[in-house]
Image (cartoon, rainbow, N blue to C red):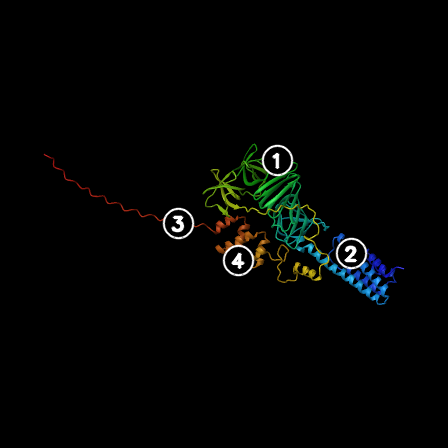
Amino acid sequence: MMRNDDLLERMIAELENGQSLESIAGKSPSAEDEDKQLLELVHAIRGLDYPKMDPQKANLQKRAVMAELRRQSQAQARQNAVSKKPAAKHTRRWAWAGAFAVLALMVVVTGAAAIWLAGPGSAHRATLVDVTGVVQVASSESETGWVALKDGDVVKEGDHLRSSADSGAALVFFEGSRTVLGENADVVLTTLDGGWNKSLKIAFDQTSGETHHSVIPLRGQKSFFGVETPFGQVNVHGTMFDVSVDQNEQAIISVDTGKVQVTSGDAEVYLTSGQTTTARKGLGLETPAYQFSVQGQLTSIVGEQWTVAGVQFTVPPTALVLSDFQPGDIILARGRILEDGSYVADRIEMAKNDHEKAKLTGEIVAMGSDHWVIGNTTIWLGEETEINGTPEIGDVVSVNFIVLDDQRWFAKEIELLDEDDEETEPVDATATETATPEGTMTLTPSLEQTLTLMASETPGPDDENAFTDCTGNAEAHPEAITLSERYNVPYEEIMERFCQHYGFGEIDLVYSLSAETGTPVDEIFEMRESGMGWGEIKALLQPKPTKELNPTKEPKPTKVPKEEVIKPTKKPKK
């Protein structure tokens, strides 16, 4: 005859295999009442809603619990055999109750560990802001195909996003990083994860269009932010960069500030502030170089030499020319500045408007009173030149310029590009991540430790004063708090501007200009939204004082000529 211990263990196994409690109880009418009660307890525990562990770890813990149950049961059986007292039945009941108390505690610990490993809920979604035109999502969980997106919608890991012509949107992640989808973008958000310490794990597959990424310096060695294109992969650890992909042709990667790693096959290059590279199918990676762009009228084509708005550049056979352009067309050209100072185009397309503009990046080689040498290019300066920051020789700058009638390149605005001094090597976004936190985690911490972990790491959803911004995170952003206190405005007002795609540096500039000039904040933002550059806005609001004329010097009094004294004629000597 089967012992009660073995019978209970068999019933628990059947319950674990999915059989109903009623069917199991019906098969074993001889089971004692306390065994049935324990079976009901097991069934109730199985019905609890708690995070699931890794199957392999769960199986190991289950085996450990069952081994402990068998050990205690065998020990109790030996004790009963020695004492032969009826009270042994009740002792066994307490042994089973203690074992299941251990099991319940392990369930709580497992749940707390799973919650800690999963990270905050906002880390698993991105919020859309500044949606313009037609931006759509196709989710693997949806059966309706492509769905139009609007401000405030959220996307999750695995979602497929695309934008039409003249369309775009910004994805804001839980710790403040963001990705802007330009027109004709086609991306899949293959990885979207994060942790309580603001760690971030983001990976995109981008097959076409343009994206701009502003990544807050990542925390933790397991954090990563990567973009996979058909021609190569981009990995970063905190920077601002752009990726432009022409399907089946090329990918152009350029960096505003910071440092990124670009790989294609066995080739690998690193881009720093102001640099760009091009990855082409079957041709590998171009050597990193500083970049230029020019928009205006195409005035001449002589062989491979084109001239647009006074800027001459080479158009090699590898360049992507998106139309049969002729002199007189208004075009936009982007490319690289080689070490010898020559300008080489990588992509030429029809311009969106007829505005004439030109931009280059490079290292300051020399600085004069009225001109600087940036790379191999001489840039002239004047009173109208706006300089942001305090550039010095050796610094990398971005220059917005125009070409004067006398062919001099005149700087309208010069901006210092901050270098990313962090030497942390970018992390491979394709590395397999395990659900194991850094360090060794004890499987049976004390109940006090478990409760502390759950209470301290879980944000308070019931806090009525918590403000949830466009990032979906109820935690206050430290930079927004600083600006709120500096200008004595509500925190929500600062975050509202941030959610409108303004950086904290831009918000600081606007409030500073408003305080200095008395111009309302809303008017300054409207000036920016109208297309004016920050240099133009500052020049308009902060006109340079007219130089005072030097006072006219009083003329010196005319000297009175001395009266001519006529000397008497000397008498001649006899």
Q: Seen from this angle, which residue lies furthest right?
A: 1
Which residue lies under the disc numbered 1? 318
Residue 276 against residue 464 in the figure, above or below: above
CA distance for labels 3 and 2:
89 Å
Q: Position of residue 256 (x, y in %)?
A: 57, 45
User: Callout 1: helix, strand or loop?
Assistant: loop
Which residue lies under the disc numbered 3? 548
Q: Position of residue 407 (x, y in %)?
A: 48, 37
Mark 3 vs mark 2: in front: 2
Sequence-first tag of 3 and 2? 2
Sequence-first tag of 3 and 1? 1
Which residue lies under the disc numbered 2? 64
Sequence-first tag of 4 and 1? 1
| Cβ atoms at labels 1 and 2 below 8 Å apart | no
Q: Is 223 on the left or on the right of 381, as rendered?
A: right
Of the numbered discs in the image, which one, if any, rests on residue 112? none
